[in-house]
């Protein structure tokens, strides 16, 4: 009898202590959320993020390096080595040609404008730091972010433009010594200034938070009298001093135009040029003359 | 010795989070990947009970919240995994859990965990997601977690059983 009572007592004590642990942990979570939600960019959580980034960044770099060869295994079965080489060469050429075609309208308009010439000249001054995508934020977190394996050691800092062969990818939000976190343009919170290459009209592109093949961006044009046509290319119009977005980077093509009488502006639906499900090699736009721990791709080199 | 145990537990959680962001995106369905950290917390809960699992859930959640590429308000996954650890710990029986019961616990835990994260997002509007999108993501996440359960839960449970300090049974 006595034994049983003692047993129940123990159980009660255990339950009570687990309850108080739960309350303490829930309060800790609430504190963390409050601090971070109200702190904004200089929240007290930011140093903790940085420490976690410095610690986990290198681990993610190594893991991605181990995983990369295995991720390419399906390719070995689909084609022989020379064919694969040919395909990738053609793809590179194709995307370069597409890039040329898509920016032709823009270039012509620019040439018509006197000051456009000056801007086009400065546009070619961009240098790129190459980087690989090493980690991707999970869909359960409802934010579309990736980590790349270049950080402050490679000359990166927050608010830099990230792009690849096909077009604009996003911007750097946070860097550690070896890694940088990039918010993709399809993220719900992302807004990019866009310009219709055919009419030079400007507007704002916002993401929908979907990255698969149906991922789209919404373009709200400033001037509601402008009609966007399907197939029109949208490029960045650039921010002051090129942060966070430099100008003239192709973003996507207009696939449809939504006209709602309630809204004052017309909304165009944009299909991004980049396939966000298979991001690997990307480039980060850095100012000319940036010192970096890796070779920087100069704009004029390969032309 | 208990420090060493904590270190091993932390290493398991860190490994789960790193695989979640660096390996599984190659298999992701619409960006949704198996939540390995949640599986580790549930595995710990089934072996060690609510107190340990809630604490481990807090650590795992904080790692997801802070390690790159996370960019949401920190503490949201910590909150979700604390609740998951506590609830999963409460369903633990002293007997070894039946395989089906373990899978059921994982499914419930995954649903609750992802829902709490999504709800906290709705409240904080970080980012402003819609309910139908959220439901789709939650369902895919549950399917992923259940699919991975047979591969992740047995080794995790064995490990945490080994790590358990010798305790006088009553």
Image: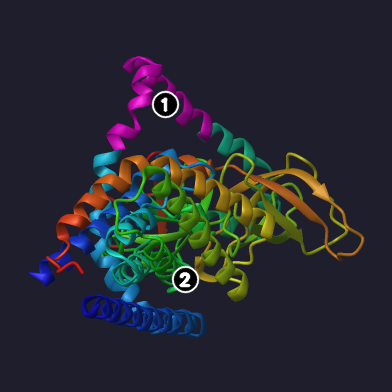
Label 1 crowd bin: few (<14), some (14–19), many (20+), radius 10 Å = few
Chain part drawn in magenta = A68-95
* Colour approach in the figure: rainbow
Label 2 crowd bin: few (<14), some (14–19), many (20+), radius 10 Å = many
**Which residue lies under the disc numbered 1?**
A88
Asked whether residue A293 is in view, the answer is no
Residue at position x 48%, y 28% from top?
A91
Q: Main secondary structure of the magenta part?
A: helix
**Which quadrant holds the C terminus of chain A?**
top left
- In the image, residue A104 lies at what x, y percent? 64, 41
- Badge 1 marks a residue whose secondary structure is helix
**Disc 1 with disc 2 on a shared chain:** no
In the rendered image of this protein, does residue A179 appear above or below residue B19?
below
Q: Which chain does tag 1 point to?
A: A
In the rendered image of this protein, does residue A294 appear above or below residue A159?
above
Out of A121 and A251, give the one closest to the viewer: A251
- Residue A10, by quadrant, is bottom left
Residue farthest to the left, as pictured: B1
Query: Is A93 on the left or on the right of A150, as rendered?
Result: right
């Amino acid at each position: 009898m006595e034994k049983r009572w003692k047993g129940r007592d123990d159980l009660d004590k255990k339950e009570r202590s687990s309850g108080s642990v739960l309350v303490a942990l829930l309060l800790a979570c609430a504190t963390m959320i409050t601090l971070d939600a109200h702190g904004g960019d200089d929240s007290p959580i930011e140093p903790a993020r940085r420490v976690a980034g410095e610690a986990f960044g290198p681990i993610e770099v190594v893991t991605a390096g181990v995983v990369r060869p295995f991720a390419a295994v399906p390719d070995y079965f689909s084609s022989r080595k020379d064919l694969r080489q040919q395909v990738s060469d053609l793809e590179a050429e194709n995307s370069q040609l597409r890039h040329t075609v898509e920016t032709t309208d823009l270039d012509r308009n620019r040439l018509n404008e006197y000051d456009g010439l000056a801007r086009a000249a400065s546009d070619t001054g961009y240098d790129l730091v190459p980087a690989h995508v090493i980690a991707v934020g999970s869909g359960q977190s409802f934010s579309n972010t990736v980590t790349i394996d270049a950080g402050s050691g490679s000359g990166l800092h927050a608010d830099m433009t990230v792009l690849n062969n096909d077009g604009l990818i996003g911007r750097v939000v946070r860097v550690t010594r070896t890694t940088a976190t990039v918010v993709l343009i399809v993220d719900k919170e992302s807004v990019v200034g866009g310009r219709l290459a055919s009419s030079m009209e400007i507007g704002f592109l916002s993401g929908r938070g979907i990255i698969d093949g149906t991922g789209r961006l919404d373009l709200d044009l400033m001037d509601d009298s402008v009609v966007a046509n399907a197939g029109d290319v949208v490029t960045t119009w650039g921010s002051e001093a090129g942060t966070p977005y430099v100008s003239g980077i192709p973003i996507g093509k207009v696939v449809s135009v939504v006209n709602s009488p309630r809204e004052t502006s017309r909304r165009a639906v944009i299909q991004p040029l980049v396939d966000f499900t298979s991001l690997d090699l990307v480039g980060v736009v850095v100012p000319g003359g940036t010192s970096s721990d890796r070779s920087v791709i100069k704009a004029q080199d390969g032309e | 010795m208990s420090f060493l145990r904590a270190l091993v537990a932390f290493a398991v959680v860190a490994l789960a989070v790193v695989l979640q962001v660096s390996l599984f995106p190659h298999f992701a369905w619409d960006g949704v990947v198996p939540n390995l950290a949640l599986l580790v917390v549930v595995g710990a809960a089934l072996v060690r009970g609510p107190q340990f699992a809630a604490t481990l859930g807090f650590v795992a959640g904080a790692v997801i919240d802070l390690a790159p590429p996370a960019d949401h308000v920190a503490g949201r996954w910590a909150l979700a995994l604390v609740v998951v650890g506590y609830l999963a710990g409460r369903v633990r029986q002293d007997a070894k859990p039946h395989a089906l019961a373990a899978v059921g616990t994982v499914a419930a835990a995954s649903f609750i965990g992802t829902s709490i994260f999504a709800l906290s997002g709705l409240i904080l509007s970080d980012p402003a997601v819609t309910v139908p999108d959220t439901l789709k993501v939650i369902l895919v996440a549950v399917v992923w977690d259940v699919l991975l359960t047979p591969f992740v839960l047995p080794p995790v449970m064995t490990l945490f059983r080994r790590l358990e300090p010798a305790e006088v049974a009553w």
